[in-house]
Amino acid sequence: MSTVSIPASTPTRRWSVAILPGRKSIWIGLVAVVVGAVIIRSVGLTGSESATMVGQAVWHEVDRSNLEVVVLERGSLESQSSVELVCEVEDVRKDNINGTTILWMIPNGASVKKGDLVIELDANPLQEALDEQVLYTENAIAEKIQAEANLKNQLTMNTTAEAEARLLIQLAELELEMYSDSENGTHKLLVDANKRRIDDVNNEILAAQATVGLRREEHRGIQELFKLGYANHNEVRRIKLTYLQAEQQFAAKLNQLQTEVSTLKKTQVYEQRKELLNLEGKVATAKRGLEQVLRNNEARLAQMQALMRAKEESLKKEDERLARYKDQLQKCKIYAPQSGLVAYPSNRSYEVREGVPVIYRQKLLSIPNLDSMQVETRIHESSLDRVHSGQEVRVTVDAFPNSKYRGTVKSVAVLPEQNSWSGNDTKVYETIVTIDEQVVGLKPGMTAVSEILVDSISDVVTVPLHAVVERDDQTYVVVKDDQDHLAPRAVQLGKASDTRVSISSGLDAGEMVAINAQDLIESLLTNSPTERIAARSMGVPH
């Protein structure tokens, strides 16, 4: 990763380490500069030595120019509108296979058009499940029809039972009304019957009285005839006995008939009350019967309705399963949703090839749109505060080094990548750069270099990066003095690009600087054997 801005107050040693992760070919020379600067001394060579080294220097004239400050990162190409296809077929567990087997698939990297068949999965287990589900659905339909008929029958039965109960109430009330009518009520039948019986009893009393009277007159007549001598004692005694027996029978009969009349009168009252209570009871019973019928009707209707809802829900579930199986059967053939290039996943944990089962929601392939591409790169944490959405980017693809593409920073991740935490303390943030023009020939996975323009400075003094070295928190360049001798000069650095750095003070346009300062600086700033040995121990060639 690279950080190319070099504030003047920041030591070059730290700056050079930060930009190392960028282009290795650009910065490798600067590494030698930084290591060599460790042993630099702020003393010069003798005049003869300096004159000898002038011929070894590669000179560059300092000029004023516009400086673009960029963050340069490598990444890989990907499509801006890549469509991922996953397995949408659920596993049919009856086939004892974990997943659905791939029967045929289009070759990896093939170009497809929208609507082309790309993968075909084994549909036989689903077809068998669909055939079984058709039977289940038909049974559910039959059960629902039967439940509808039962519900209608129950409604009819409820109406009939309620009508019968209400009719019983009307009949009981009518019977009570017929009995209770004061003028024409049926209770008068009992009264009339009792009256006739009492009249019959009275007639019997009168008849008995008449018989007694007749026997009394016969007895009186015999007595008169006996006085006149026309009847004897036997006839008198016989008539008298008949008269006495008639009186005794009358007395007994009268007592019996009077008791019967009294009983008839009392019985009439009780019978009327009894019949009235009976009829009123019938009315009350009929009303309670209606209430019971209504409650029973409500309970039976609720049961039929609940059964009907259960059958409807069952049919609904079976229909949903049937529709899902039909949909799943159609999804066994996977078609390209857009035109593009077929790319299968390279993850070895799950293979996508013919004869291998795939599970539900497993990624099968992606179809990127090759007309619009973007670069997925990673920004080093030291450059994160300078990169944001909307910045201009120049994109170069390794496969087409002579072509540059206009781009824009689309997004910068808020959190670092998790795998960037392992191994060292360096953290990187995923950054997406879109290519803002239509491209031809670019494919996903190609390596691309993104030059993110973070700043642009006009008319500043600039030198190549190789012309700068650092020692003891001080930055130097190698120049020629008035006697054409080499000499180190302290300078203050400004912002830098990937190849040039601005000089804020210490150097003017038109002066000459050595761009191979790393090859010269040791001799210019180190003059004692002890320091040369120290330099060699630190890995600096002498």
Image (cartoon, rainbow, N blue to C red):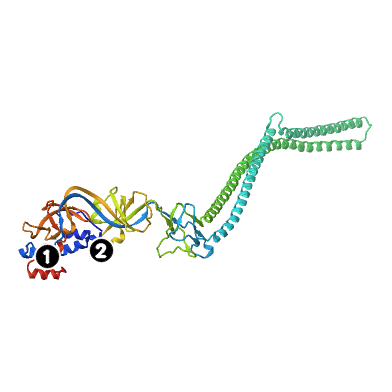
Which image quadrant: the C terminus? bottom left
| Distance from the alpha carbon under mark 2 to that under mark 1 | 33 Å
Q: Is residue 508 left or right of residue 26?
A: left
Q: Are marks 2 and 1 in contact (CB under 8 Å)?
A: no
Position of residue 175 in the picture relative to residue 314 (left or right): right
* Residue 475 shows in the view: no
In this rendered view, identify the residue nearer to me: 215 or 533.
533
Q: Furthest residue to the front?
A: 55
Task: Identify which residue, 7 or 399, lies in the foreground.
Answer: 399
378 to the left or right of 242: left
Determine the image quadrant of residue 431: bottom left
Query: Circle 1 is placed at which residue position?
Result: 522
User: Disc 2 residue type?
Assistant: Asn
Image position, residue 199 (x, y; %): 78, 32
Q: Residue 271 appears at what percent x and percent y?
A: 70, 38
Which element type, helix, strand or loop, lies under badge 2?
loop
Which is in the foreground here, disc 2 or disc 1?
Answer: 1
* Neighbours of disc 1 within 10 Å: few (<14), some (14-19), many (20+): many
Residue named by callout 2: 424
Q: Secondary structure at mark 1?
A: helix
Quick check: can you spot residue 128?
yes
Residue at image location 51% in from the left, 59% down from the top: 120
Against 41, residue 240 (above or below) is above
The mark that comes first in sequence, 2 or 1, is: 2
Position in image of residue 243 (x %, y %) = 85, 35
| Depth check, front residue: 264 or 217 | 264
Which amino acid does the dot numbered 1 rest on?
Glu
Residue 230: where, in percent of width, then height? 94, 31
Residue 180 position by quadrant: top right
* Residue 207, image quadrant: top right
Left or right of residue 254: residue 60: left
Judging depth in this view, the residue of 134 and 364 nearest the camera is 364
